[in-house]
Amino acid sequence: MSVNQQAHTGPPYGQPQPGYQGYQQPAYGGQPLPGVPQSQYGAYNGPMPGYQQPVPPQGSLRAPPTSGAPPPATGASLPSGHLAYSQFGHGDVQNGIPASAAPMQRPPASQPFLPGSAPTPVSQTSTFQQYGPPPASVQQLSNHMAGMTIGSTTASAPPPAGLGYGPPTSVPPVSGSFSATGSGLYTPYTASQGPPPTSVSQGLPLAQPPFLGQPISTQRLPTQVPGFAPPPSSTGIGPSSYSPATGAPRPPTMPGPPLSGQTVAGPPTSQPNHISSPPPPSTMSGPHPGPPMSGLHGPPPPTHPPQPGYQMQQNGSFGQVRGPQPNYGGAYPGTPNYGSQPGPPPPPKRLDPDSIPSPQLNELPPQQKPRHRIDPDAIPSPIQVIEDDRSNRGSEPFVTGVRGQVPPLVTTNFLVKDQGNASPRYIRCTSYNIPCTSDMAKQSQVPLAAVIKPLATLPPEETLPYLVDHGESGPVRCNRCKAYMCPFMQFIEGGRRFQCCFCSCVTEVPPHYFQHLDHTGKRVDFYDRPELSLGSYEFLATVDYCKNNKFPSPPAFIFMIDVSYNAVKSGLVRLICEELKSLLDYLPREGNMEESAIRVGFVTYNKVLHFYNVKSSLAQPQMMVVSDVADMFVPLLDGFLVNVNESRTVIASLLDQIPEMFADTRETETVFAPVIQAGLEALKAAECAGKLFIFHTSLPIAEAPGKLKNRDDKKLINTDKEKTLFQPQTSFYNNLAKDCVAQGCCVDLFLFPNQYLDVATLGVVTYQTGGSIYKYAYFQLETDQDRFLNDLRRDVQKEVGFDAVMRVRTSTGIRATDFFGAFYMSNTTDVEMAGLDCDKTITVEFKHDDKLSEDSGALLQCALLYTSCAGQRRLRIHNLSLNCCTQLADLYRNCETDTLINYLAKYAYRGVLGSPVKTVRDALINQCAQILACYRKNCASPSSAGQLILPECMKLLPVYLNCVLKSDVLQPGPEVTTDDRAYIRQLVTSMDVAETNVFFYPRLLPLTKADVDSDSLPAAIRNSEERLSKGDIYLLENGLNIFVWVGVNVQQGLIQNLFGVSSFSQISNALSTLPVLENPFSKKVRSIVDMLQVQRSRYMKLIIVKQEDKLEMLFKHFLVEDKSLSGGASYVDFLCHMHKEIRQLLS
Ligand SMILES: [Zn+2]
């Protein structure tokens, strides 16, 4: 059963409370809940009886509830109240989300525990939120506008195709430097929720599906958008691309190859073959031979049919080969009325696919060359979509009062105002409008998933979740499903009872929680209670939620340092010890506490373990050696875990002595599992949770439990046995992980390998305990210490919860069925994490188990029980309400591709553990083809089969999916090591949406275009070699690495300013940082690098790449729109392939 139970002698969370066990046990065991799927509603506390009448622990430390007497509600002034609720279908009884306009002033009194963050009253600005179906026109308008900015992609004019640089030798450099880089690369990062713009706007209400049932076509567009000024139709290409991200229909991104007649440039329908029969994926990437570009010739534009022209594009239709669609282009210039109207004559440019330059031509074998070259500018551009969303949605706050609202993209800076639903910083969904039936969901193949980051860091402008203390009685919960009180519960019978929004069960309101209802049926203390009016908040947990019915002790951090030969010789041991001397003063603290409650301990090891007694009363630290690693125990209890301030002198002395003690070591072998066991035993003895920071260098081959052998074998790649490379070589670590989770022992691993050390196996415990892995291959003090120290500092200081259990409850009709992330599960519903930090996400997939209704929508409630860094037991609750639809078009209009990619990548990366990589890749392609084919079949306006039509919200699905397919896990290049792949696989599994977004589609910035006088970043460009100019310098970042690419023709002055050398040839690519030079360009570039480093959760490795230098091969690997050396398709080719797949499905 549950891990916890095994670990403890007594029933985990207290015997008296059967409740707790329940939380470990799936769904209430035997309590059959009528109509309620068991697994779905298990509560943290199992059987309700246990919970319902929690027996106040004797000697409970808890103070009386402070929030008892809420100030008079100001709510009366909310006129919009009724309206607001109507949408939730609660009828008169309302307790839904606060009406948007209602100002919510929360008395500080109710948030006794909020550390530091003075509960600033959340005065919610009254944004007008339309509860009713929001006017579609608004959205459309914005979309439109977005659409207009098309030209931007082209801003950085692509250099002539086929830049002269040296043809990539197909073999990556094998040199040490290379590999070092390679592995180093992978340091994960975090997301970037940069500082929100000061002014944020309220998210545009999702447009209600304008066209239910109707063919999507024409009408949706911007007809309603008066006044929008069309952007100049610049290159003719762009028209399409662009539209805003959210749900509303946007103009088609790319003028796809239109089918014959309608669009202009497309190849004649008669030649559909071209697209439909692209070369097999692996070969597709070939260049297309087209005649070099000329923009103007090409087949004469077809006559545009009046209607279809524009409309089709709206859906994001792509014709077969793309040419700009005539209508589209025409319409923009000046004509507000596109819609169904035929636009002005199409611009004559670039219509012919054949006329577009094809950079890769020469690379392709003749037989593979497609007949037509698709204009890369005409296919959906990630850059354009990102820019459009920024300009449309970055200026106003995203207010969460409206159900089913699609948030701005993760790449947009925006502020969030919580008005009843969790911020997108905590939860993002693949779709905010989910199909009412399982059949619809299956038909669409769109996965229903939420990416949850329960402890996400918020920008300073946003309010941390309020901490609510209900005293000894604990949080109010539904009697049946155990859902926690939230804004969607409906109070009835004058406030004496409430009906659960998840399972409909009616529960008595405990006397201490009773409050009268106002004339709208809302409690008069509605705005005074975070749990009634906000999407996210915390409850102080009672002792019932604690292991063994005891409040937890503060956690401990144990630093465990490998002191074998390599670690000492590289200077690593000395570096770590020096750093710890100061870092220990920055351990996480709760709120305004003066010092951290976390205790620390130290262990060093090679083939044996050395424990240190650093008790404050000692003059010198004492070492105790344990050489019997087969049966690990901790040789001392008193003096091992200490308070930093009390033992400061002894600790400093120890850290000074360690490097000296092992300076002459000749021991090269290490153990590993016993190290974790030692840390685990120490925490058990201290009866606390905690984290182990293990600094390790090699494959543990010394005789000991968990001993490993080198089983790396690259010959397994592309065979049925490839999956074994991702699997642990022994189950020993799985069992150890289970024990660690039971104790709340989280393991963070810092690896410094010079060769294979089996990350797939060593990482098991880290992964299952919610820890982090950092890898610094070929660690060299000079080049890697900054990166390592920055990572270590952040890792030690970041917010983290311990001994965590998360459960996601859902309203009737759907339930959480699958989970992805770094955690352990002992049953089907509870996600257990020994530690959960602010950067970790859990992706949860949902499936139908009944019908949903459009009226009531669907609700999610994520409850995380954890111990804070000061040892306080808390529950963090996040609620989210979604819309439900009976029309597929509504689903497609409210999807979020970035989140979809996050889910698909995690799904695929888990898949490689059990299936051949090719099978996983094929399944991904197939699923996406089905998603797009379903849209085409059921939502798009009728058009020729030769035309590729993508839903606006998913127009980037092909390009992003291709990036996932080409990633090192699914299609490794020759230089990628087995450890790199295992490492990346684990990293991605915990990434949030912003992280996966930039990881799979890196950000590429032209540094030479940066405005040295402003704080802004230069506009990003697409990840393709043809976008690079020999005369410029670029920066590429993916969350793990930053590349600075220098073209061969960059002006000498720029080189001097940035690198301090006089010529291109003198630039050293061994630099790991940019020199500090006193000139505006140097300052600007360094400030950009610094800004990016701050945005990510890991310190990115800086790599200087000179054009035509051998390192360029590595850099090109990240130009993800191009064909990759490992056989990955180019974007254009992949799009053709997807089109073919879709056509096959439709035929
Ligand atoms: Zn319930």
Image (cartoon, helix red, strand yellow):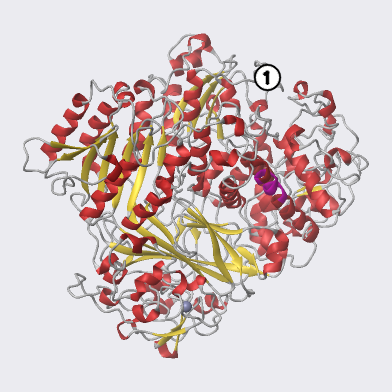
Q: Quadrant of residue 754?
A: top left
**Does the magenta run of residues contain 923?**
yes
Query: Which is more toward the observer, 463 or 645?
Result: 645
Q: Quadrant of residue 885?
A: bottom right
Magenta stretch: give its range: 920-926
Query: Which is more toward the observer, 227 or 261?
Result: 261
Residue 542: image location, x then y, percent: 28, 70
Q: Residue furthest bottom?
A: 493
Query: In screen coordinates, is 231 left or right of 967?
Result: right
Residue that carries the numbered disc 1 in the rendered image:
163
Q: How many marks?
A: 1
Query: Which is more toward the observer, 848 or 712?
Result: 712
Query: In screen coordinates, is 567 left or right of 94?
Result: left
Residue at horizontal 40 percent and vertical 43 percent from the top: 772
Residue at horizontal 25 percent and vertical 39 percent from the top: 628
Query: Which is more toward the observer, 234 or 184?
Result: 184
Identify which amino acid the numbered label 1 is placed on. Answer: Leu
Give SS at disc 1: loop
